[in-house]
Image (tube, grey):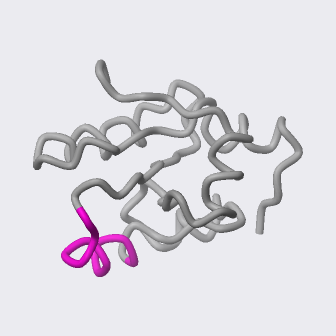
Amino acid sequence: MEGVVRVPPRETYNKIKADQALLVCGYESDARFEKYRLEGAISFNDFKARFPSLPVEQEVVFYCNCTDERSAAAQAANYMAMGYPNMEALLGGVEGWKAEGLPVL
């Protein structure tokens, strides 16, 4: 998706550890969330439940198992279209995260 910022895994990890961003699985299926669960991530269903109370400027990084970030970028673009400017995608997806040696569950 054009216009969606891709955030490197280490930068994303540091932001979620500092409570500066949410890391959200871009798949709506809880089974896929469990299969591709990254430390610090929340499920898409949890995100949808929290969404009404999130500030418009909240930074959210979606992730997926696509190396081209296709599913994550699509979710980010959907929320950007609703007026939330800080919706991003995890660069390299799950494999990019693992390649950095970051924790998975």
* Residue at 47% from the left image edge and 49% from the top image edge: 61
Q: Residue furthest right?
A: 101
Give how far across and how far down residue 102 sits, in percent.
82, 51
Image quarter hosting the N terminus? top left
Residue 11: quarter of image: top right
Compared with 46, 28 (above or below) is above
Front in this rendered view, residue 97 or 52: 52
Q: Residue furthest left?
A: 82
Q: Is residue 1 left or right of residue 59?
A: left
Q: Which residues are the magenta region?
A: 46-55
Disc tally is: 0
Residue 44: quarter of image: bottom left
* Residue at 46% from the left image edge and 38% from the top image edge: 89
Compared with 75, 73 (above or below) is above
Q: Residue furthest top?
A: 2
Front in this rendered view, residue 11 or 90: 11
Q: Is residue 42 magenta?
A: no
* Residue at 72% from the left image edge and 34% from the top image edge: 96
Image quarter hosting the C terminus? bottom right
Q: Is residue 57 left or right of residue 65?
A: left
Front in this rendered view, residue 5 or 78: 5
Characterize the magenta stretch by its predominant secondary structure: helix
Front in this rendered view, residue 89 or 95: 89
* Residue at 22% from the left image edge and 58% from the top image edge: 56
Q: Is residue 102 left or right of residue 93?
A: right
Give how far across and how far down residue 31 sits, in percent.
52, 71
Give how far across and how far down residue 97 sits, in percent.
73, 42
